[in-house]
Image: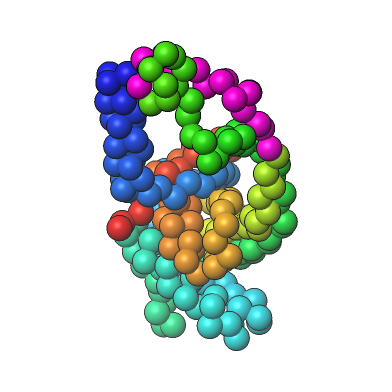
Amino acid sequence: MKRWMIAMLMAVSAMLLGGCATSTFRSSVTAFHEWPATLPSKTYVFERTKEQNDSLEYRNYENLVRNELARLGFEEAPASVKPALKVSLSYSNNGRDVREVYPVVVNPYPYWGPAWRGYYGPFYSPFYDPFWYGPPIVEQRVSQYQLFNRQLKIQMADMATGKKLYETTVVSEGTNSSLAAVMPFMVRSAFTDFPGPSGVPRRVELKLEQ
């Protein structure tokens, strides 16, 4: 019994330590590209819709993309320079109701506690019978919550011909309804191992700083 208690305490400690570990943001990333071996220029300009021009939320996400492009050596072209590439992005966040039913084992005699069977009475016998008062009861519990599907699509095309060179889609799911909270990680996921394999879905995991 003593060994069993020690093992249980160790398992609980491991779970608690695991809960304190760094959280991870997971997403599915698929990129399609015909990226040239060399580019004469890595200058670009953002191509926006009318609605995006008037959106403060869009400007915030555009800044995130701008920072990632700068990290990869791209440079936003000033008004006086004709850019080599044009970049566009779109995003969505759709929620749906989820209902889960799962079994839970409950104690049929919560006020009696565990039964100890033997001559010396309760609590002193070395023989424990978990079914002394009958078998455990399994109840069905229901959990209801909203699950959000977040998507981000980024495209890069040749400015002169309009030919698409790079197109990536990032998909993540979670219970956080705020797209702004997860967008920094979605943008980072979009450019992980850029340009990456073409047409191959990848699972990208990013550690969240505590």
From the viewer's perspective, is 71 left or right of 186? left
Q: Quadrant of residue 132?
A: top right
Quarter placement of the C terminus: bottom left
Front residue of 137 and 103: 137
Front residue of 168 and 34: 168
Point 48% across, 25% down: residue = 115
Q: Quadrant of residue 144?
A: bottom right
Q: Quadrant of residue 157?
A: bottom right
Residue 91 position (above or below residue 60): above
Count of numbered badges drawn on the protein: 0
Quarter placement of the N terminus: top left
Point 52% across, 21% down: residue = 130
Is residue 160 inside the magenta stretch? no
Q: Residue 30 location in percent, x, y?
A: 56, 43
Is residue 127 inside the magenta stretch? yes
Q: Which residues are magenta?
A: 124-139
